[in-house]
Amino acid sequence: MEEIGRRLKAARLAKGLTLEQVEEETRIRKKYLDALESGRTVLIPGEVYVKGFLRSYGNFLGLDGEGLVEEYKALKARPAAEDGAGNGGPAEAPAREPEAAIAASAPRASAEPRQPAFATPPRRSSRSRPKRRRNGPGPCLYFLRRLMVALILILPLAAAGWWFWGRQAAAPPPQEPGQVAQEPGTTAQQPEPEPEPEPEPEPEPEQPPASGQPVPAKPVITVGAPQGDEVDITITASEVQLEMDFTQGFPWLEVYSGGETLYWSKASGPLSFTGKDFRIRIGFVAGFQLALNGEPVDHKLEGGPYWINIKTQ
């Protein structure tokens, strides 16, 4: 048995394994592994365990475990055969009688050898244990990603729609040309017939300025570049005579001056206001004509809406 143990130990050392590592892999206790390598099989309880451990250990080291068991059986049978030959043969019968009695009184073992209670199946080490591969994000994470993408796409559209709907709700309903916006709670009244216009007096011919009197200079009007929907117009005058006319429809119009609302309705025909500074809100500028202190202003605006700020200098 010492020869078998030396072969087991040599195979283990060739693989660079310790008894602790073999114990972890084969689930055979270290003291039994050491007993197999040293040939001290008397430390192992029972021949069934000796053969089972020898077979498992040999197969683990890459040896022929079944061949090692057969070799161990032959070694165990050799001393008995030699004793029988030395005694002449007849002495073997008395020696077998106690064995037969012991075998009859002992419970019959099953055909297959039972494994010891502490010999559990080999456990894979952390180095050889395959790692579980993840197939990707779980369904909850996938749903949250889809929900975030949908919110990113929908929220700007919803905000734009809300803003547009609020602007439409704030504006008064469209009115027919010639109608004037009415305050809430007032009833519509029938328009009174307009009186016939009186003939306008003929303008007097301009008199040339008397000699020695300075000729008044024309106001300088500057139209700034649009900044978004804001346009600034400046005029070199202390007071402004604002005149507006509309030749292509009647847009929504708001006129403010000095913190007061001068006009808030749809435009209806020529309009004129006098003041220092004005802030005008107009829905569209197609056909919009503007004059300051009798001087026409080329605003060069298109589309709309715009905020037009008229300031004096």
Image (spheres, rainbow, N blue to C red):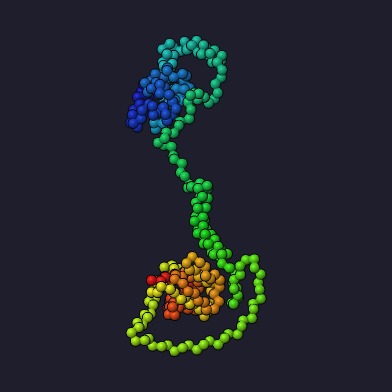
* Of the pair 214 and 119, the residue shown nearer to us: 214
Q: Is residue 297 visible?
A: yes
* Any part of residue 7 in sight: no
Query: Horizontal and vertical percent for residue 280?
Result: 48, 70
Q: Is residue 138 above or below residue 92?
A: below
Q: Quadrant of the N terminus?
A: top left
Q: Is 163 left or right of 228, judged from the image as shown?
A: right
Could you tell me residue 110's position as x and y percent? 55, 23
Query: Image point 38% across, 88% down: which residue?
Result: 208
Of residues 255 and 217, the one nearer the viewer is: 217
Q: Quadrant of the C terminus?
A: bottom left
Q: Position of residue 215 (x, y in %)?
A: 36, 82
| Near-viewer residue (215 or 139) | 215
Count numbered badges in the picture: 0
Q: Residue at left 34%, top 31%?
A: 16
**Residue 84, picture quadrant:** top left
Q: Is residue 191 left or right of residue 200?
A: right
Residue at 46 percent of width and 41 percent of height: 132
* Residue 43, quarter of the rendered image: top left
Q: Position of residue 218 (x, y in %)?
A: 38, 80
In the rendered image of this protein, does residue 82 appear above or below residue 120?
Answer: above
Residue 178 against residue 151 in the figure, above or below? below
Q: What residue is drawn where x is 44% and y is 22%?
A: 50
